[in-house]
Amino acid sequence: MDRVENARASKVAFSARDLAQIAVFAALIAALGLPGAITVGFSGVPITVQTLGVILAGAVLGARKGTAAVLVFIALTLIGLPLLSGGRTGLTALASPTAGYLLGWIPATLVIGLLTYRILPKYPLVLGLLINAFGGLVVIYLCGAIGLLVRTDLDLAHAISTNFAFIPGDLAKVVVATVVAKGVHRAYPGLIRA
């Protein structure tokens, strides 16, 4: 009976190593906000490098640890730390039309992590690119468009079209994240566990 309870606890609980990895990736996402943000178009949606950290969290740490890293980062911003690009806090971001993009980081990391686990241990580059593009672009853009629909008077077509300006930069982030994840999984196989 103790073995069953220990097995359940080990699947739910994080080891000290897991907690360290979560903390490092939360710090990485924060550090990627230091260059600031560039606001594009009328929607007020900023271009940031922080989504690179979100994609990396899912692709390198997997669904469980990657999502935990993003949740830790968002929690830190919600208690008032100005860790979002441009020195914004989570409360400021959630009060703005861009709230959907920030909240979209959570399902994006989860999706990337779950799909990445399925292609390991080889981590083929093409599949990695597709997974990271799906989670890092499609999922985040969808959540962002929903946020814009709720918070602004944009119609569906305009809410979706606001994402078009971000595609080239986000594709570059996807490529960087995929190459880094490939190298990490080659050097440290078994980093993502079920």
Image (tube, rainbow, N blue to C red):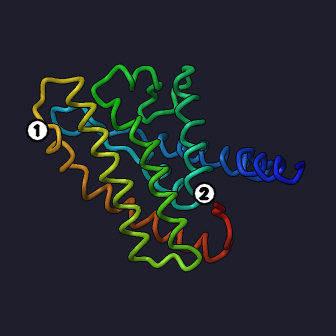
- The secondary structure type at the circle numbered 1 is helix
Residue positioned 46% across, 33% down in the render:
84
Q: Judge whether 122 appears above or below 9 on screen.
A: below
Residue positioned 82% across, 52% down in the render:
4
- What's the mark number on residue 27? none
**Residue at the spot of label 2:** 61
Indicate which disc, 1 or 2, sits on the residue closer to the N terminus. Answer: 2
Q: Dividing the picture into quarters, in which one does residue 126 lie?
A: bottom left
- What's the mark number on residue 158? 1
Q: Amino acid at mark 1?
A: His
Q: Are marks 1 and 2 in contact (CB under 8 Å)?
A: no
Q: Is residue 87 left or right of residue 187?
A: left
- The secondary structure type at the circle numbered 2 is helix
Which x, y percent locates residue 82? Answer: 51, 26
Which x, y percent locates residue 61? Answer: 60, 57
Residue positioned 30% across, 53% down in the render:
138
Q: Which residue is at the front of the view, 172 or 9?
A: 9
Which x, y percent locates residue 187? Answer: 66, 75
Image quarter in which the C terminus is found = bottom right
Q: Quick one: which residue is furthest to the front in this view?
A: 1
Q: Judge whether 102 appears above or below 79 on screen.
A: below
The CA span between labels 1 and 2 is 34 Å
Which x, y percent locates residue 72? Answer: 60, 36
Q: Amino acid at mark 2?
A: Leu
Q: Judge whether 192 appears above or below 10 on screen.
A: below
Q: Which residue is at the front of the view, 77 or 85?
A: 77
Q: Is residue 72 left or right of residue 49?
A: right
**Crowding near the residue tagged with mark 1, few <14, some 14–19, many ≥20 C-alpha atoms within 10 Å:** some
**Crowding near the residue tagged with mark 2, few <14, some 14–19, many ≥20 C-alpha atoms within 10 Å:** many
